[in-house]
């Protein structure tokens, strides 16, 4: 009897695994948005809370300290607690803490919140590695890992751009531009700058500001001590300057790093500006001329910006809970053919919960120590891209806020190409050369090239040329990241999340050290010394990577699922 067509057609595997990787990628986007929005806000937070550069460095480092310390416990918990439940909890907690940063009123509070945020985010990538291990066939793990990590880079690239636009959007045109005594810092130094001698632009502009004050700026010469009444008098004098129509002319537009809004207002003939527009233009001009002495008008927005990021994270948590299941067989839309495809080549029996963290095995693993040193050293240099780069662009090249946001986002945006290529590269080299060189070469060689890109920053004079060199650093760093993820999956056996957590812990100790260390180098020896320091960290990272051997498992040899 003939077989009907429906009986001859073999069902094709469903594609739920792609949905799962998409949800994990969305989680990674949110992860990096919440992590790297703060560096772009640091100037406004510093003004608002009265923090120093060293204190802001501690705030940055607190996140990575919590992130590093939490890696192993979070990875172990992810291995035992079920990815769906645990990762949803992580997203909810870090999103709530991110939103609460916007309510912080003291240094200790913001440090504690960022420390907690780091602890909550610590489980994201270990759980994500376990997610990939459960949902992706062995041959595609490198590429799938690169896609998830790509989401992080996308969030990191979007963070400065989106944050810059949110800052402007949350300070409406009718927001008062009037100064208060709390808007002025280091009054004696500001008075000196307003009365400085010389023909350079800063001195000429300072004398113009002083001359626009009542009585021709006589008040400035009376500010030998920052007594309250003198501060009030100077504040009143500068508010008088805000109504002066000739403060911002063509020279100021050329010399000062004015934000885009001020540049647009400066194009309008002064008689056509409304009084509120003139005051806003002049306020933004004073901020650009005296960034260390006049509080930023856009600083009013940093708190609602943090609230927005926190709320977005809660939405992502809900989507993850609805779309994800711990195993393919548990997902209602995953058919048996897809389950079989994903499970092909896996050990027949995998215990659901490993009994304990393989700490002794981790400590004995030479390759794991080398990969950890790779992460420590590279993260010290790489973190400059997501912490002090906006400060560098503002202080060295006087880049306005919106353009600064776009520039600061370029390295991570371009780096996404390296992340995708890195997944393909390590999978291809592994097939051609085996695990030993297929994993270690993509870790090592891009580090040496990135070292050269940091050195090249010493030779460039324009901000865009430096940003493009740093984009090269980002591409090359991301080129090696999928190999590191795949290495942890290769050697981790049933301890994948714990093993990746161990590796990330050491890497983020380097990230926690980076803001403090680079601040000391910048303040002590300048920005060129900082670039050389970053280059040295990448040189060391590449050298240690050459010794990594992914053929040696972490799990004990008598473990039936060690390989």
Image (cartoon, helix red, strand yellow):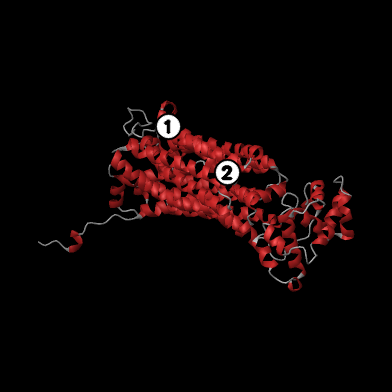
Of all residues, the one furthest to the left in this rendering is 1
Residue at mark 2? 117
Q: Position of residue 460 (x, y in %)?
A: 56, 49
Q: Quadrant of the N terminus?
A: bottom left
Whether residue 89 sits left or right of residue 111 in the image: it is: left
Q: Position of residue 272 (x, y in %)?
A: 74, 74
Of all residues, the one furthest to the front in this rendering is 199
Q: How many marks?
A: 2
Task: Look at the image and tell me whether residue 100 can be seen.
Answer: no
Q: Earlier in the sequence, mark 1 or mark 2?
A: 2
Occupied quadrant, residue 546: top left
Q: Element type at marker 1?
A: helix
Q: Could you say which is closer to the camera, residue 260 or residue 44?
A: 260
| Image marks 1 and 2: residues in contact by CB distance under 8 Å | no
Cα–Cα gap, marks 1 and 2: 26 Å
Q: Residue at x 40, y 52 (%)?
A: 20
Occupied quadrant, residue 516: top right
Residue at mark 1? 368
Decide: is 124 above or below 315. above
Q: Quadrant of the C terminus?
A: top left
Q: Position of residue 558 (x, y in %)?
A: 32, 27
Residue 377 is tagged as none
Q: Residue at x 86, y 56 (%)?
A: 217
């Amino acid at each position: 009897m003939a077989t009907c067509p429906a009986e001859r057609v073999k069902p094709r595997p469903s594609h739920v695994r792609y949905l799962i990787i998409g949800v994990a990628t969305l989680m990674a986007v949110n992860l990096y948005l919440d992590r790297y929005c703060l560096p772009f806000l640091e100037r406004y937070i510093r003004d608002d809370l009265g923090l120093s550069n060293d204190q802001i460095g501690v705030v940055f480092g607190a996140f990575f300290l919590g992130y590093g310390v939490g890696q192993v416990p979070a990875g172990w918990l992810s291995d035992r607690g079920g990815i769906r439940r645990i990762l949803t909890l992580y997203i909810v907690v870090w999103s709530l803490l991110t939103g609460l940063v916007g309510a912080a009123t003291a240094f200790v509070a913001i440090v504690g919140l960022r420390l907690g945020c780091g602890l909550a985010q610590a489980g994201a990538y270990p759980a994500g590695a376990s997610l990939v291990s459960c949902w992706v066939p062995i041959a595609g793990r490198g590429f799938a890992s690169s896609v998830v990590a790509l989401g992080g880079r996308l969030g990191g690239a979007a963070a400065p751009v989106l944050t810059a636009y949110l800052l402007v959007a949350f300070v409406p045109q009718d927001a008062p531009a009037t100064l208060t005594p709390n808007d002025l810092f280091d009054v004696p130094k500001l008075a000196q700058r307003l009365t400085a001698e010389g023909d350079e632009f800063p001195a000429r502009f300072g004398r113009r500001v002083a001359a626009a004050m009542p009585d021709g700026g006589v008040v400035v010469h009376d500010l030998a001590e920052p007594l309250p009444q003198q501060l009030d008098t100077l504040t009143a004098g500068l508010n008088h300057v805000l109504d002066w129509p000739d403060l911002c002319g063509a020279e100021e537009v050329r010399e000062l790093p004015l934000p885009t809004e001020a540049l647009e207002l400066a194009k309008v003939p002064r008689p056509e500006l409304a009084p509120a527009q003139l005051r806003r233009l002049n306020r933004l001009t004073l901020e650009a001329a005296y960034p260390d002495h006049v509080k930023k008008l856009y600083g009013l927005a940093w708190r609602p910006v943090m609230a927005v990021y926190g709320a977005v994270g809660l939405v992502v948590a809900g989507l993850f809970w609805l779309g994800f299941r711990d195993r393919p067989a548990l997902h209602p839309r995953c058919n048996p053919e897809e389950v079989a495809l994903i499970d092909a080549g896996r050990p027949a029996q995998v215990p659901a919960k490993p009994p304990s963290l393989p700490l002794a095995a981790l400590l004995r693993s030479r390759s794991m120590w080398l990969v950890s040193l790779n992460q420590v050293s590279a993260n010290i240099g790489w973190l400059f891209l997501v912490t002090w780069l906006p400060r560098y662009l503002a202080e060295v090249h006087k880049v306005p806020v919106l353009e600064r946001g776009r520039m600061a986002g370029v390295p991570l945006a371009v780096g996404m190409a390296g992340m995708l290529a890195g997944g393909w590269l390590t999978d291809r080299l592994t097939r051609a050369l085996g695990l030993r060189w297929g994993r270690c070469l993509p870790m090592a060689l891009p580090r040496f090239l990135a070292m050269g890109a940091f050195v090249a920053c010493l030779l460039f004079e324009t901000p865009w040329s430096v940003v493009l060199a740093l984009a090269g650093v980002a591409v090359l760093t991301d080129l090696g990241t999928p190999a590191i993820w795949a290495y942890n999956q290769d050697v981790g056996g049933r301890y994948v999340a714990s093993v990746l957590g161990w590796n990330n812990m050491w890497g983020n100790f380097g990230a926690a050290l980076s803001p403090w260390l680079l601040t000391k180098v910048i303040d002590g020896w300048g920005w060129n010394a900082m670039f050389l320091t970053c280059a040295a960290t990448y040189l060391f990272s590449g050298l240690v990577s050459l010794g990594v051997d992914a053929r040696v498992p972490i799990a004990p040899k008598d473990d039936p699922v060690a390989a």
